[in-house]
Amino acid sequence: MDSLDRKILSALQEDGRISVTELASRVGLSLSACHRRVRELEQSGVIEHYRAVVSPAAVGLTFEAIVFVTISRTDPDTVGAFEEAVVAIPNVVQAERLFGDPDYMLRVLTPDLAAYQELFDGALGSLPGIQRVSSTLVMKRLGSSPSVPLP
């Protein structure tokens, strides 16, 4: 990967809907060379996919919690069952397995506190293998850039 690839990636992270013509102009390449590089970045897996970033508040998801989960055992069956169940919960928009304690951090979005309580008492509380669950409420999001820093 060279500096032109990094320029292409930076521009696409800012605006994934930019036309190849505009992208080529921004990075100083011909249209065909830029298109070829973008396709190579896609095919090699550097660009995983494209998507729209939706405002949670605009679709009524104004309540956000960070949930910390410790599981009872870390054997492959317990971990697999837990992870499979977590990804099946639509309100869990991000899940990270951590080193140390707790084992997982989940980002959860719901319309309000009552909906979160229902989710906590139901789907989250019945996840396979859980030993302990604690949560904290997000007061304010300071930034939500999904961009990857490029050296």
Image (cartoon, rainbow, N blue to C red):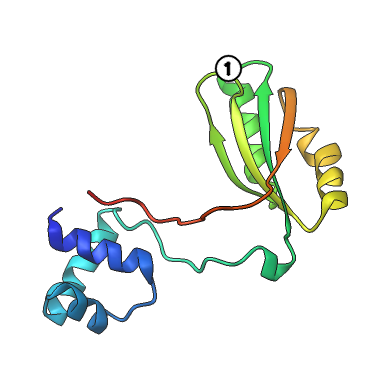
Left or right of 42, for residue 33: left
- 8 is higher (above) or lower (below) than 18: above
Q: How many numbered marks have been drawn onto this rendered protein structure?
A: 1
Amino acid under label 1? Asp
Q: Work out whether residue 113 or residue 126 is closer to the camera in this orientation and state it.
A: 113
Q: Residue at x 21, y 64 (%)?
A: 7
- 76 is higher (above) or lower (below) than 26: above
- Give how far across and how far down residue 62 sits, in percent: 73, 59
Left or right of 95, for residue 25: left
Residue furthest bottom as drawn: 21
Describe the element under mark 1 as helix, strand or loop: loop
- Give how far across and how far down residue 92 sits, in percent: 66, 47
- Give how far across and how far down residue 149 sits, in percent: 32, 50
Quadrant in the rendering for residue 97: top right
Quadrant in the rendering for residue 61: bottom right
Left or right of 41, for residue 112: right
Q: Residue at x 32, y 67 (%)?
A: 12
- Give how far across and how far down residue 28 sits, in percent: 12, 75
Q: Residue at x 45, y 55 (%)?
A: 146
Q: Which residue is mark 1?
A: 75
- 21 is higher (above) or lower (below) than 78: below
Q: Residues within 10 Å of mark 1 (few under 14, many from 20)?
A: few
- 95 is higher (above) or lower (below) than 28: above
Q: Work out whether residue 95 or residue 76 is closer to the camera in this orientation and state it.
A: 95
